[in-house]
């Protein structure tokens, strides 16, 4: 009798599976396709439990779908550009490329040890020239379509990361998403993608995403922030200019007692000129320049200054004073508002603070102003002042201006002869070989753009590349993308609810419009897995509560790690790490091992057969709805039944097949020990016999006057008369009906019997 030794059998089977190309993506079959995608990792060098959870969930689904007759695409790759590699290079005086490669190597070993059924032949690395060539190509496509532009703007700057950030990367009010530093505002010229041109569709198409969790859709909806209102013109009495405001409440027009402009508004200074307010207005404008957008957005609405000027209310002909206040943002609407202190809290606070009138008025019902839709969404700032990213394929020429690099000259490669000192600007700004380039238009001397693309560009299209990862002529073949897209199931963390998931939807729409992507939404179903926590806190280095996956795999095996993670909690919920839980999973696999290796397989047994078929039915339904923990519980029950009543051929086969997506190594080993020549992972999923899963008995609650008094067991096909007769025999029921008359019997077939007594 052999012992269950995962450390021996797991590597053996992993090698066998690779040799047999067991998980190669089937092309050219007529099986229906299933694209099962997990969010690819950043190659930090270490797999953490969050990864293991994400990838275990992805693997169960891949294996289950394969066994159910689908051609499954289950790929993996590396989101390999980004800051940590560059920071490590500065720290260790190396280059980000070898550092990244080493990290990928280590994590590949870790991933392979988990026995996940990836098609490794489709591995992508976003920092490889063959990949980022196409990231640059997509930039050029955006440029050609007028969706990429450069402009000077007030942007978010992270002083620690030494780069600008997109609005989506400023979190917890004004912190850098990566390093938690407080973000500053700077006026810089940067590259943007015109995601606002897609605001309407990004919003409307959320309705199509019925397979997405509601909270994610709500977050995107709020981020896009559609507002329907009108623009109304207020005449200025001093000149013939008009002040245009944006309001969602034109009905409150009669109640307007003053106006407020953003301090950056072009009319701000003009209104003050020549009045006694000129100086205070100048001072105020200067002061607000130093406030962050966030500070302004949460401003109490009490800070402000009178411009000295007036505007005429078009409904009443009245003149109202025009003020400046920091809470009015220039980037939203028209940067000017009509203030209605009787209706709006912020206006009310402002009016109280500055002694402005508050006027209750009739609702205005007339027609005025032009209907206008505004979005909170801003264009996506994509350029970064860092080295380790895809260079933006643009050359600046004194004669021709901004010139895109021709497609035939892609990729614009990152130079290798650079030093990482960590001082001053990105090394690209110091690399002569990189900087100097001839203008593609006039051939004269030009200078390359030294900013690189934010890594969110790389991850916005990797799911398309997986459909055709080795294509050197195109980003992917349209044919192949059509075969595999959209992703049927996407699995990843909730932290990307806006960032990655919004950007990917945008990329897909642009590529769809350009005739490249086969669909305009990339991910049909989305599962956001919960966090892995220990002792009540998120597992993280800083908290010192990290459990190393390598240690768990070494001590208990990958099968135990996978089983524990899937058993401990439903996938969307938080998972509390428990050493006892890991031990429990390990013990269960040991029990399965011994059931098959130490016990004689017995003769057929109707009770075991019934339990087997009920388990097939239950586990199938559970995996289908991602209820992996209850599926595992049912497999534990089936194991117990066979310990009690003896194992059977049929029961063992079912146990192994149903357990195989969770514990692929152990089940493969036992399957082969039983004499099977082919891999268990090529077997089809089992069907249950409907006759055998029928319940023979039912429990019916009995009520007296609507109150539950007993529950009785009757044959599943019992008629009302049979249930009533059984209820009459119940002593508990009798104690409530004694001496009374049954005036009515209410029977809900198979569900409940209620005796109404007087
Ligand atoms: C008068 C009014 C009366 C307003 C009332 C609201 C309530 P959303 O839904 O967010 O689009 N507003 C317009 N532009 C602004 C800006 N640049 N900065 C700050 N506030 C601005 O809100 C639109 C409302 O926010 C507009 O409608 C305007 O105030 C204000 F009882 O006009 B309202
Ligand atoms: Zn930062």
Image (cartoon, rainbow, N blue to C red):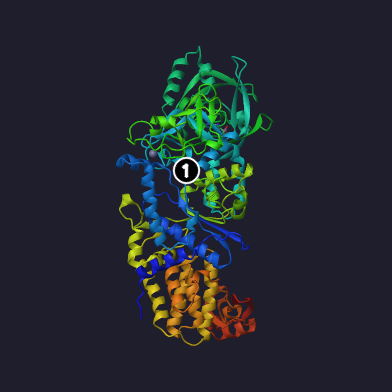
Return the residue at label 1: 129
Q: Secondary structure at mark 1?
A: helix
Residue at the spot x=50%, y=11% of the render? 274
Residue at the spot x=56%, y=61% of the render? 26
Q: Quadrant of ligand 2?
A: top left
> Which residue, as the protein is rendered here, is positioned at the far bottom?
603
Query: Percent from the top left, x then y, of residue 477?
Result: 59, 49
Query: Percent from the top left, x then y, of residue 268?
Result: 52, 20
Displayed quadrant of residue 692: bottom right
The N terminus is located in which quarter? bottom left
- Viewer-proximal residue, 181 or 424? 424
- How many labels sit on residues? 1
> Which residue, as the protein is rendered here, is positioned at the far right?
367
Vertical side of 15 occupied by 207: above or below: above
- Viewer-proximal residue, 523 or 240? 523
Vertical side of 222 occupied by 536: above or below: below
The C terminus is located in which quarter? bottom right
């Amino acid at each position: 009798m052999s012992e269950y030794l995962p450390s021996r059998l797991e590597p053996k089977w992993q090698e066998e599976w690779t040799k047999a190309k067991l998980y190669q993506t089937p092309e050219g079959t007529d099986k229906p396709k299933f694209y099962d995608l997990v969010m690819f990792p950043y190659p930090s060098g270490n797999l953490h439990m969050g990864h293991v959870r994400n990838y275990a969930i992805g693997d169960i689904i891949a294996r289950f779908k394969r066994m159910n007759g689908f051609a499954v695409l289950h790929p993996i790759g590396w989101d390999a550009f980004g800051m940590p590699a560059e920071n490590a290079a500065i720290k260790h005086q190396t280059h980000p490329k070898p550092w990244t490669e080493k990290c990928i190597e280590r994590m590949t070993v870790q991933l392979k040890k988990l026995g996940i059924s990836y098609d490794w032949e489709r591995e992508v690395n976003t920092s490889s020239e063959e990949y980022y060539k196409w990231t640059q190509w997509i930039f050029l496509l955006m440029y050609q379509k007028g969706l990429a532009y450069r402009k000077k703007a007030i942007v978010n700057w992270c002083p620690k990361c030494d780069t600008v950030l997109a609005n989506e990367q400023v979190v917890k009010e004004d912190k850098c998403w990566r390093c938690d530093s407080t973000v500053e505002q700077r006026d810089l010229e940067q590259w943007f993608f015109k995601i606002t041109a897609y605001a309407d569709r990004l919003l409307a198409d959320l309705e199509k995403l019925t397979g997405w969790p509601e909270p994610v859709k709500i977050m995107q909806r709020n981020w896009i922030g559609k507002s329907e209102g009108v623009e109304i013109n207020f005449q200025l009495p001093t000149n013939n200019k008009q002040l245009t405001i944006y309001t969602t409440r034109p009905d409150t027009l009669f109640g307007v007692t003053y106006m407020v402009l953003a301090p950056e508004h072009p009319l701000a200074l003009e209104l003050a000129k020549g009045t006694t307010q000129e100086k205070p207005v100048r001072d105020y404008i200067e002061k607000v320049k130093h406030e962050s957008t966030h500070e302004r957005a949460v401003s109490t609405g009490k800070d402000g200054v009178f411009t000295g000027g007036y505007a005429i209310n078009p409904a009443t002909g009245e003149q109202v004073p025009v003020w400046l206040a920091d809470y009015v943002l220039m980037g939203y609407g028209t940067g000017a508002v009509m203030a209605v202190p009787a209706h709006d809290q912020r206006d009310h606070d402002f009016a109280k603070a500055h002694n402005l009138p508050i006027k209750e008025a009739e609702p205005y019902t007339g027609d005025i102003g032009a209907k206008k839709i505004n979005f909170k969404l801003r264009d996506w700032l994509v350029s970064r002042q860092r080295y380790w990213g895809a260079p933006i394929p643009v050359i600046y020429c004194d004669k021709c201006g901004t010139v895109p690099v021709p497609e035939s000259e892609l990729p614009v490669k990152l130079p290798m002869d650079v030093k990482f000192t960590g001082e001053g600007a990105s090394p690209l700004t110091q690399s002569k070989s990189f900087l100097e380039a001839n203008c593609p238009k006039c051939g004269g001397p030009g200078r390359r753009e030294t900013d690189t693309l934010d890594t969110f560009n790389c991850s916005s299209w990797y799911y398309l590349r997986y459909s055709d990862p080795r294509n050197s002529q195109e980003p992917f073949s349209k044919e192949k993308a059509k075969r595999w897209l959209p992703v049927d199931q996407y699995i990843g963390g909730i932290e990307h609810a806006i960032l990655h998931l919004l950007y990917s939807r945008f990329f897909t729409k642009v590529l769809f419009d350009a005739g490249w992507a086969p669909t305009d939404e990339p991910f049909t179903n989305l599962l956001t897995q919960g966090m892995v926590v220990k002792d009540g806190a998120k597992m993280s280095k800083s908290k010192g509560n990290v459990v190393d996956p390598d240690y768990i795999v070494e001590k208990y095996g990958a099968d135990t790690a996978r089983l524990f993670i899937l058993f401990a909690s439903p996938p969307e919920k938080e998972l509390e790490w428990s050493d006892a839980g890991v031990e429990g999973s390990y013990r269960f696999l040991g029990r399965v091992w011994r059931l098959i290796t130490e016990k004689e397989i017995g003769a057929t047994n109707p009770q075991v057969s019934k339990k087997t078929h009920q388990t097939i039915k239950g586990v199938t339904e559970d995996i289908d709805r991602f209820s992996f923990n209850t599926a595992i519980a049912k497999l534990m029950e089936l194991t117990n039944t066979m310990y009690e009543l003896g194992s059977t051929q049929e029961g063992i086969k079912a146990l192994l097949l149903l357990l195989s997506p969770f514990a692929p190594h152990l089940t493969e080993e036992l399957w082969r020990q039983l004499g099977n020549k082919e891999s268990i992972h090529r077997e089809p999923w089992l069907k249950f016999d409907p006759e055998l899963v029928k319940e023979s008995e039912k429990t019916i609650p009995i009520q007296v006057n609507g109150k539950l008094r007993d529950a009785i067991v009757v044959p599943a096909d019992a008629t009302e008369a049979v249930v009533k007769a059984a209820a009459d025999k119940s002593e508990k029921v009798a104690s409530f009906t004694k001496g009374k008359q049954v005036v009515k019997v209410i029977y809900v077939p198979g569900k409940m019997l209620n005796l109404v007594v007087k």
